[in-house]
Image (tube, helix red, strand yellow):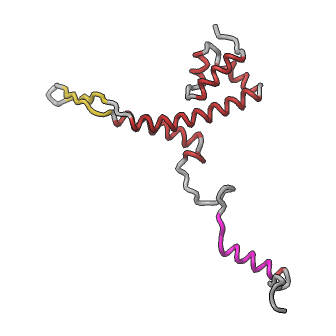
Amino acid sequence: MPRKLDAATIDAILDDIAVGVATIRACKAQRADPRDFYRHMLRDEDIGQRYTRAKVSALEVLADEILQIADQAKIGKVVTDKGDGTKEVKKADAVERARLRIDSRKWLLAKLAPKKYGDRTVIAGDPDAPIIDPKAELLRGLVAVAGSGGDRSSGGGAQ
């Protein structure tokens, strides 16, 4: 039977989410129905804001995990079936598995926080990095001068 969502249960769920535990898994660990948690989050603005902060924290955990996985050597067995029905077993670093784990986390980070973790190349301007066209700026300057009657003096030159 699901547990009633009291403040302590919600705190425990949010604490788990902040360290990278999936929301559904965090709810189940507290014997809480995930649907009830989501309903509480939608109804209570404070819980919604805390959930958002927990998810942002979880992104940092994912980024940290990438470094841990890359730095950790994990020896595994590579089994190759030979043509004569025998198998060859070699011990080797589990590079493919580590690459999959890293790539999965990188993909998630790029999708969930593209401004911070994405591989986006800015081709067109956006509010954070507008494109400045030198010709357009020159034209604006000329229009401004023409609109002021051609007076380009700043008051400090000879008259």
Question: In the image, residue 17 lies at what x, y percent?
Answer: 60, 26
Q: Is residue 21 above or below residue 95?
A: above
Give the residues in magenta.
131-145
Which quarter of the rendering shows the N terminus?
A: top right
**Left or right of residue 12: residue 45:** right
Residue for point 55% across, 55% down: 121
Locate residue 36 relative to residue 93 in the image: left or right: right
Q: Position of residue 32 (x, y in %)?
A: 64, 15
Q: Is residue 117 above or below residue 35?
A: below
Q: Is residue 59 left or right of residue 86?
A: right
Of the pair 97 and 63, the residue shown nearer to us: 63
List x then y, in percent, for residue 122.
Answer: 58, 57
Furthest residue toward left: 84
Residue found at the very far top of the displayed protein: 1
Number of numbered markers: 0
Q: Residue 26: x, y in percent?
A: 59, 21
- Give the quadrant of residue 136: bottom right
User: Residue placed at 51% from the left, 38% from the top?
Assistant: 63
Asked if residue 143 lies in the magenta stretch, the reply is yes
Q: Quadrant of the C terminus?
A: bottom right
Q: Residue at x 80, y 88 (%)?
A: 157
Residue extending farthest to the bottom is: 159
Q: Within the magenta stretch, is there residue 57?
A: no
- Main secondary-structure element of the magenta-colored stretch: helix
In which image quadrant can residue 79 be found?
top left
